[in-house]
Image (spheres, rainbow, N blue to C red):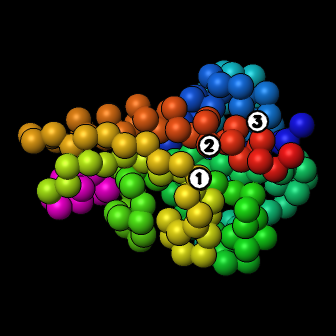
Amino acid sequence: MPRIAVFVSGGGSNLQALIDSEVRQHIVLVIADRPAAALQRARDAGIIDTIEFSRKALGKQRLSEEIQKAVEAYRIDLIVLAGYLSIFTEEFSAAWRGKMINIHPALLPRFGGKGMYGHHVHEAVIAAGETESGCTVHFVGEGVDKGEIILQARVPVFEGDTVESLAARVLEEEHKALPEAVLRVMSESR
């Protein structure tokens, strides 16, 4: 049975979507890179193995090294980045190529890369006059928001949309897309 670690940085609504799906039985560890409400959400769901690292205190190199030690200790097979904001070292990303996936709140390759996270993405989509947005689940590759796309879900962008209204519509699709993508990756790796 594949062992999954979910990485979080915030409230954990995508983690909750995984917990509420059949993926839950595979989640053995939740890691945060800062104080995150998602860790309590994990504990409330019975996932007692949670680790909080301080990205600011450790820096990118040491954070990647400490996370590598943790995922080795827990014999992790798949890493799911569910609203995780820290960037890994190239060595860490290379070691987990094909075994680490991310969800992004836009239709990659557009509106991805450095600085494109959270509300910044939705602001950029609206400012560009796009008529469609959505989310992308992809394998983590070299570079930020790069890597083979596993699946995308689309939503319309309406005239008069605010960052908040568009974000809510995209997040609703994220909650469906992430568990579906994880299940797809697990079934293909068997």
Q: Earlier in the sequence, mark 1 or mark 3?
A: 3
Residue placed furthest toward the front: 188
Q: Mark 3, residues whose alpha carbon is within 10 Å: few (<14), some, or many (≥20)?
A: many
- Residue 121 lies within the magenta run: yes
Q: Mark 2, residues whose alpha carbon is within 10 Å: few (<14), some, or many (≥20)?
A: many
At 88% from the left edge and 57% from the top edge, which residue is drawn?
72
> Disc 2 vs disc 1: Cβ atoms closer than 8 Å?
yes
Magenta range: 120-128
> Disc 1 vs disc 3: Cβ atoms closer than 8 Å?
no
- Kind of residue sitting beneath label 2: Ala
How far apart in space, not on screen, are marks 1 and 3 (Cα)? 20 Å
Quadrant assignment for the N terminus: top right
Circle on res. 150? 1
> Disc 2 vs disc 3: Cβ atoms closer than 8 Å?
no
- Kind of residue sitting beneath label 3: Ile
- Tag 1 secondary structure: strand
- Tag 3 secondary structure: strand
How far apart in space, not on screen, are marks 2 and 3 (Cα)? 15 Å
At 75% from the left edge and 58% from the top edge, which residue is drawn?
99
Report which residue position mark 2 lands on: 181
Circle on res. 27? 3
- Nearest the eye: 102 or 55: 102
- Kind of residue sitting beneath label 1: Ile
How far apart in space, not on screen, are marks 2 and 1 (Cα)? 6 Å
- Nearest the eye: 182 or 91: 182
